[in-house]
Amino acid sequence: MLYQYLDGDNWRHIYIVGDLHGCRALLDEQLLAVNFDTRRDLLVSVGDLIDRGPDSLACLRLLKEPWFRCVRGNHEEMALAALTQGDEQLWQMNGGDWFWRLDGAQRAEAQACLMRCQELPLIAHLVLDEQIVVVAHADYPASRYAWEQPIDEYEVVWGRDRIHRLQRGLGENIAGADAFYFGHTPLDNPVSGWNQHYIDTGAVFGNRLTLVKIQ
């Protein structure tokens, strides 16, 4: 699935969270602090639930929660390549070694969750009142956004050209939507420019986890 449509009218509050990378305890603290209500609120992740942090399996279990949505990150892509194509080296080099340290039952659970990541969208399209908010892992590699238009899927998950230009003071709005939220590139603090917001603040490296309320 390339795009997923989410209608804000279905929830009271909607939050977007940066790359988790196994930091489930940090997420639970943040949700408690904002009085997140699992019956009425929605959490949308920019992807990279797994690797490097202390509890990747607990983060994968979020996929089973009705109050949680996620787009696919490059770490989910590496895990899927390892599990479906036998390309284990790249994943292990980038923090996937936790998977092989799990015991049999936990590894089977983790593998089942990771296979579910094949069904994750690359782009979440949120409609909030009069606004369209787009969530993707790394970039929306086009000058104009349109629901379900074909897009370079590799750049959606891996691309850094746009944020590198933004950090040099270069860039422009992406037409067709009001706001875009991305992760992928660890930052000391969230970075915003034009209508783009980068919210991976490197929680797994000892920094804070960024949670943004958009509704």
Image: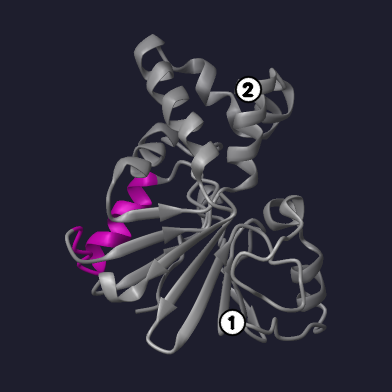
Label 2 close to label 1 by CB (< 8 Å): no
Badge 2 crowding class, 10 Å Cα cut-off, few under 14, some 14 to 19, many 20 or more, is: few
Q: Which residue does the numbered mark 1 point to in the structure image?
A: 177
Amino acid tagged 2: Thr
Residue 123 pos. (x, y %): 57, 60
Residue in the image at 23% along x and 64% along y? 36
Q: Quadrant of residue 91?
A: top right
Taking depth in this image into account, of 183 and 208 the one nearest to the observer is 183
Magenta highlight on residue 145:
no
Residue at left offset 82%, top offset 65%: 161
Colour style of the rendered protein structure: one colour
Q: Residue at x 60, y 31 (%)?
A: 79
Q: Residue at x 65, y 45 (%)?
A: 74
Q: Which residue is mark 2?
A: 84
Which residue of the protein is positioned furthest toward the top in this rendering? 104
The magenta segment is 24-38
Q: Is residue 141 above or below residue 177?
A: above
Q: Is residue 131 left or right of residue 154?
A: left
Quadrant where the image shows the C terminus? bottom left
